[in-house]
Image: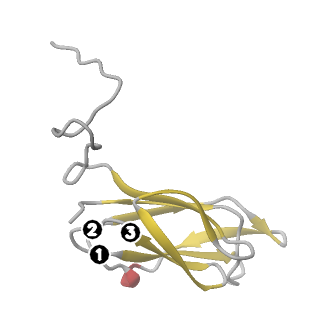
Amino acid sequence: MSTIKVDTLVAADGSSAVTLTKQSAAKSWFQVDGTGTATIDGSFNTSGLVDEGTGQYTISFTNSMSDTHYAFTQGLEYTYSGSLVLATYTEASKVTGSCRAIHNAASGGASVDVPETSGNIDGDLA
């Protein structure tokens, strides 16, 4: 068996980053602060955020997905007025260039803006 040890992995041109296109790896991730004016606090392959209303956001991808058969995972932990906030997702809003990815709702059903919601997209890039 061989061992490969490297400090930096680059594309064949010697200077650009290696692009994962068909491997099973996260193709996009993001962390959103939904309080006040919603902002993306950290991300990869995420070009923008549209605030669709209280607790609801659309995430745009820098590089589109190959189709709409990608997986979305979202997570948060937050309590609002004594009730646990749940992260839900509407699959009908997936397109190759964006995903209406976040809808945060308190256990009573009311939509809620929270200080930290994270998500990732798994699938193939176009």
Q: Which callout, 1 or 2, points at the residue further toward the start of the chain?
A: 2
Q: Residue at x 72, y 81 (%)?
A: 108
Decide: is 30 above or below 23.
below
Residue 77 pos. (x, y %): 68, 58
CB atoms at circles 2 and 3 under 8 Å apart? yes
Please provide percent x and percent y for residue 123.
Answer: 28, 60
User: Which residue is label 1 attached to?
Assistant: 96
Q: Do the residues labelled 1 and 3 touch (CB within 8 Å)?
A: yes
- Disc 2 marks which amino acid? Met
Left or right placement of residue 112 versus residue 3 in this view: right
Pinpoint residue 121: horizontal percent, then vertical percent.
38, 61
> To which quarter of the image does residue 27 belong?
bottom left
Q: Is mark 1 in CB contact (under 8 Å) with mark 2?
A: yes
Dot placed on the residue nearer the N-terminal end, 1 or 3: 3
In this view, the residue in front, 9 or 36, is: 9
Kind of residue sitting beneath label 3: Phe
In this view, the mark in front (2 or 3): 3
Q: Which residue is under mark 3?
A: 61
- Location of the N terminus by quadrant is top left
Q: Marks 2/3: CA distance?
A: 8 Å
Would you name the residue on which mark 2 appears? 65
- Amino acid type indicated by mark 1: Thr
User: Which residue appears farthest toward the right when viewing the image?
Assistant: 81
Q: Residue at x 65, y 77 (%)?
A: 105
Q: Residues within 10 Å of mark 3 (few under 14, many from 20)?
A: many
Which picture quadrant has residue 57?
bottom right
Judged from the image, the secondary structure of the residue bearing numbered disc 3 is strand
Q: Distance between the residues labelled 1 and 3?
A: 8 Å
